[in-house]
Image (cartoon, grey):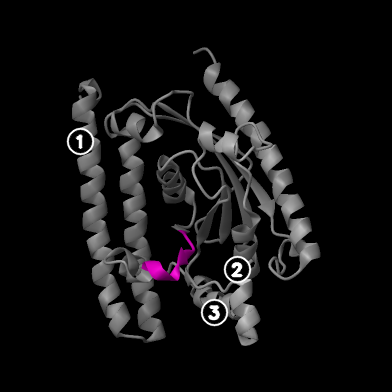
Amino acid sequence: MLTLLLAPFRVIINFTFGALATAIIGLLVILVGLPKLLLPIPVVQRGLSTFANGLFRLWGYAMSLMFRLTQPMHWHIHGDAQLHRDRWYMILCNHLSWVDILVLMHLASRNMPMPRFFLKQQLFWVPIIGLGCWTLDMPFMKRYSREQIARKPHLKGRDIATTQKKCAKFRHIPTTVINFCEGTRFTPEKHQRKNSPFKHLLPPKAGGTAFTLQTMGEQFDAILDITIVYPSNKRPAVWLLLSGQLRDIYVNVETIPMQPELIGDYFNDEEFKARFQRWLNQRWQHKDEVIEKLISRADNPPQQ
């Protein structure tokens, strides 16, 4: 019945459902965070973290339901990945829309560990969001610039060591870390302004990806190169989802085995930095080709 509603009513239903699900589950996560904050006992904190992670997966199921709440949704998922909830992954993904996060939550709620983001330390003090992310064990990073290290040499390596310590808890909870390597959502204007050498992508920023691998590389079982394409439409994907017009999503998943040569000091080792940038640009060139193929599939769907 909901699929027969006019677009404005679909928007109201989808937005209300998403907002209520986020508010209710977010509040429950925060309530779990309060005793976790007050009881710094490792075994208690691990138990509370596991419970909070279950709530986070419940939110993932809710966001997955949004894709078919007011519309018949078709997922076109291709790739070679055999994913498991009890392993550790890092995702390299293109970034087209805020809907990308919901797509990744849909994939995670099916057969992946729940995703985590590396956050700036300042976000910890944002009301509600900070405590919620802390409860979910999302690491808050404090980076030191070259100028700060030059003035205070004892800070060298401290950001890596501190983040590694914070990520040690991930040994107890299987985790997926998400990296949107472009650093921002793709638009034709940004593509032109950055003079991108890729047809469908912005140039990747290697620093954040390298930092993640330096911090947690030994914990990851694999890197997942995930590519998302929405069928060509001039309207934003967020509007298409809320208005019940986003009928198809194309996703390609490739597994990249973890390799020791991908772990190094990106910010102080010039040779490693050049090698890592070359590797990531090669991945991005391949992703550009994958996007072209997915667009072709979307524009020329197989006949029923």
Q: Name the residue beneath numbered marker 1.
A: 13
Quadrant where the image shows the N terminus: top left
Label ID, residue 301 = none
Q: CA distance from mark 3 to mark 2?
A: 12 Å
Query: Vertical placement of 119 versus 102: above or below?
Result: below
| Badge 1 or badge 2: first in the primary sequence | 1
Q: Is residue 156 visible?
A: no
Circle 3 SS class:
helix
Q: Name the residue beneath numbered marker 2.
A: 216
Circle 2 SS class:
helix
Name the amino acid, label 3: Thr
Q: Name the residue beneath numbered marker 3.
A: 162
Look at 40% across and 33% down and name the residue there. Answer: 237
Name the amino acid, label 1: Ile
Report which quarter residue 149 is drawn in.
Answer: bottom right
| Badge 1 or badge 3: first in the primary sequence | 1
Q: CA distance from mark 1 to mark 3?
A: 43 Å
Rendered location of residue 173, percent (x, y): 47, 68
Q: CA distance from mark 1 to mark 2?
A: 40 Å
Rendered location of residue 200, percent (x, y): 60, 33
Residue 120 lies in magenta, yes or no? yes
Look at 59% across and 81% down and name the residue there. Answer: 158
Q: Which residues are magenta?
A: 116-123
Comparing 13 with 153, the one in front is: 153
Report which quarter residue 8 is drawn in.
Answer: top left
Circle 1 SS class:
helix
**Which-is-in-front pick, marks 3 and 2?**
3
Q: Is residue 291 visible?
A: yes
Comparing 279 with 205, the one in front is: 205
Rendered location of residue 188, percent (x, y): 53, 31
Q: Is residue 3 left or right of residue 283?
A: left
